[in-house]
Each structure stands twice: as structure tokens, then as C-alpha cells.
Image (cartoon, rainbow, N blue to C red):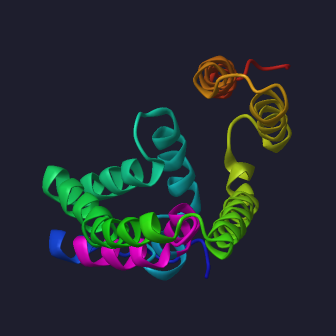
Amino acid sequence: MSAQSPLARPQSPKHLFVAFTLLALQGFGGVLAVAQRVLCDQRRWLTREQFVEILAISQILPGPNVCNVALMVGDRFFGWRGAFAALAGMMAVPLAIVLVVTAVYVQYAVHPAVAGALKGMGAVAAGLIGGTALKLASALGVNPMGTTVCAGLAGLAFVAVALLRWPLVWVLIGLGVLACGFAWRRLGAASLPRVEGQ
């Protein structure tokens, strides 16, 4: 799909509710991977760059990332009514399913097959997140920091959280401030008028 094709928009808050309900029901093991595909590729409500911006903000806010994404996407189109419709769609049916699964899990949690299945789903969820990250990496080409700096920051975040086991909140604050400052400086330099002879 070409980058120049016009974006669509949901018809109503009810349309948002149904779309996010269907999105949530596809997200076994990782809704963010599905959210990117549905919102950018299928429904074309957002560009990949817009999705990356919304996802970046949702990462630093408290609460589940995908719920934050739903709130921001809903608000983008219909204000607070859209935000609540999208969040309700994201939560209502999955909540009912989780309550039923929890009741069943309590009965069978000690069974080796159940424990093995849950470990397998953990690997699938990690794969979905990794695949989404690779797919969205192309959106970093228009980032003011540039792909190399973005990759370096991602590497630092991985080392700090996965290998050094530093608390995520401090890594987000530290690297987030560093990234914001660098981007601000690059954007400021790009907006300055060029002096003749330079």
C-alpha cells in the first residue's frame, strides 16, 4: 500500500468499540502486534509513523500499553467518547474470557501439560513482540534522531533491562530524557536558517 494513499477513519464510537473488540479477540499472547497490523495495514486509521508515536507515549504512561493505545486512538477520532468506546472494546469481552479461564486454571494449574502450554505461549508472545518491533523499525527512517541513534538507544535499553536487570522505570526515565534531549536538539538545528557561505 502506498504511503500517499489517504487514511480512513472510523464512522462512530460504536465502530471503534467493535473494531477494538475484534482486535482484542485476536491478541492471544500479544495484542500490540495485532494492533499495529489492524490499525495501520487493515483499517488504515494510522500510518506506521503515527502508530510508533502513539506507542512511544503509551510506553511511558502507567497501565497496559495497548489500553493506552486504545485510549489515544479513540480520543484522536471522537474525543472522550471515542476513548471510552475503544477502551471498552479492548476490555469487555477479554475480561469475561479471562474470568472463565482463571476459574478453569485454578482447577488444572498443577497439571504438567498446562504448565508446558503456558511456557510455550510465553515464547510465542515474545516472538510477536519482536516481529512487531522489526516491522515498525522502518518508521524510524523519518525519526529526527536517525536510525543509528534509535538502534543504539534500543540496544542500551535491552542491555540495561534484560542483562543488567535495572528497574524499567529508571531506564525509561534515563534513556527517555536522553532521547528527548537529542531529538529536541536535532529538530532545533534543522529549523535554524542556513547562513550563506556555510
Q: Position of residue 104 (x, y in %)?
A: 41, 73
Q: What's the residue at 65%, 27% (across, down)?
A: 183
Q: Is residue 85 visible?
A: yes
Give the magenta-colored segment's residue range. 17-37
Q: What's the residue at 74%, 51% (across, down)?
A: 141
Magenta span contains residue 24: yes
Q: Position of residue 68 (x, y in %)?
A: 38, 47
Q: What's the residue at 65%, 66% (across, down)?
A: 115
Q: Is residue 191 above or below residue 119?
A: above
Asked whether, in this view, residue 147 is left or right of residue 55, the answer is right
Which corner quadrant of the image does residue 100 belong to?
bottom left
Q: Position of residue 174 (x, y in %)?
A: 66, 17
Asked whether, in this view, residue 46 is left or right of residue 80, the answer is right
Tell me the quarter of the image containing the N terminus: bottom right
Residue placed farthest to the left in the image?
81
Q: Is residue 103 above or below residue 145?
A: below
Q: Is residue 129 above or below residue 43?
A: above
Q: Is residue 169 above or below residue 97?
A: above
Q: What's the residue at 34%, 69% (across, down)?
A: 94
Which residue occupies the foreground of this view, 178 or 1?
Answer: 178
Which residue occupies the foreground of this view, 16 or 24?
Answer: 24
Magenta span contains residue 19: yes
Q: Position of residue 38 (x, y in %)?
A: 48, 75
Asked whether, in this view, residue 51 is left or right of residue 181, the answer is left
Q: Is residue 9 visible?
A: no
Tell me the quarter of the image containing the C terminus: top right
